[in-house]
Image (tube, helix red, strand yellow):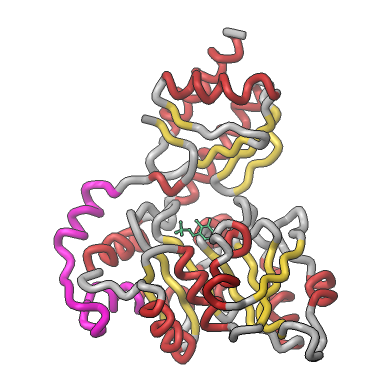
Amino acid sequence: MIDLRSDTVTRPGKAMLAAMMAAETGDDVYGDDPTVNALEAQAANLSGKEAALFLPSGTQANLVALLTHCQRGDEYIVGQLAHNYKYEAGGAAVLGSIQPQPILAAADGSLPLDVVEAFIKPDDIHFARTTLLSLENTHNGKVLPLAYLQQAFQFTRDKHLALHIDGARIFNAAVALGLPLEALARYCDSLTICLSKGLGAPVGSLLCGSEAFIQRARRWRKMVGGGLRQAGILAAAGSYALNHNVARLQEDHDNAFWLAEQLKSLGVAVTRQDTNMVFARLPDEQITPLQAWMKQRDILISTGPVTRLVTHLDVDRQALETLVGEWKAFLSSR
Ligand SMILES: *Cc1c(COP(=O)(O)O)cnc(C)c1O
């Protein structure tokens, strides 16, 4: 099976499973799991933050970050298409009484700071208190420019806002920029990292921030049901991912670039290629038949008004050659 629907579909390989089998464990709610503690220390170290917290999912990591930054009646400014606005079932509003103020992202994935400024509410009893700016990096595969991160950080200092980065794929950004994580993470108060996307772990996310922030986040994680017991078996997969699967993200980016070029040469309207994602606009009459054609050949893609193809560690160049060959055959069959 060749699966390009998302980079979440990766399955743990033999070496990762062996690391999980060998993990030393303890009860992490008591702080006793040495493998979780080591992963959290590793994440703190890589991000240059004082501390980190291991959570079951990126959605929970973002929710816990928002609950920790904001009080009931506070507001966060966030992208209209950001995961922690649009794709987390309204968790911050439902569970935290935190109001989102969504705004449109610019073409490069950033939230224009003049627009953010215009949406910061004055201190007035009519308004929710604007306390946080939340950015996403990468956003739909786009790497936020480093200069923008610097400006956004300074801007939030001037405006007395906290800055959170949803960095589900922040290592794709770091690798694309050729920088260590710390060089990006220094321009925020907190960031989340998904271990279960391109990094290839089956489960897990990390939230990084100051010691005091993470201590408060730990209580929220417990409250929302994210306190795990012998979680070392999962953390071992995370550590394995950080040790072995970061630098290789470049391969996914190169593969996505190669795929985009190949599809263009078949006449497919590739609209964008960023990091490990390729976006294409198919003629309406191809949307359903192409997906079915591929499925019959054990290739999974999700076609739609915009078709997104995602490269990851379980699709190599040969698999992509197969995909391109089948795409070509599909086009000639019509
Ligand atoms: C996938 C993703 C998350 C969290 O996802 P989970 O499936 O809950 O781990 C958060 N933010 C972004 C940008 C994502 O792509």
| 290, 317: nearer the viewer | 290
In the rendering, at what x and y percent does residue 73 appear?
Answer: 65, 83
In the rendering, at what x and y percent does residue 150 appear?
Answer: 69, 75
| 124, 232: nearer the viewer | 124
Magenta region, residue range: 12-41
Q: Residue at x 49, y 39 (%)?
A: 5
**Can I make out residue 184 in this image?**
no
Q: Quadrant of residue 207?
A: bottom left
**Can I make out residue 23 in this image?**
yes
In the rendering, at what x and y percent does residue 191 appear?
Answer: 53, 73
Query: Quick one: quadrant of the N terminus?
Result: top left
In the rendering, at what x and y percent does residue 187 appear?
Answer: 62, 77
Q: Could you tell whether 259 is left or right of 130 in the image?
A: left
In this picture, is 77 found above or below 288?
Answer: below
Q: Residue at x 47, y 77 (%)?
A: 208
Query: Quick one: quadrant of the C terminus?
Result: top right
Q: Could you tell whether 249 is left or right of 31 in the image?
A: right
Q: How many marks?
A: 0
In this picture, is 90 found above or below 296?
Answer: below
Q: Residue at x 48, y 37 (%)?
A: 4
Q: Residue at x 52, y 74 (%)?
A: 95
In this picture, is 12 found above or below 295?
Answer: below
Predominant secondary structure in magenta? helix
| 268, 96: nearer the viewer | 96
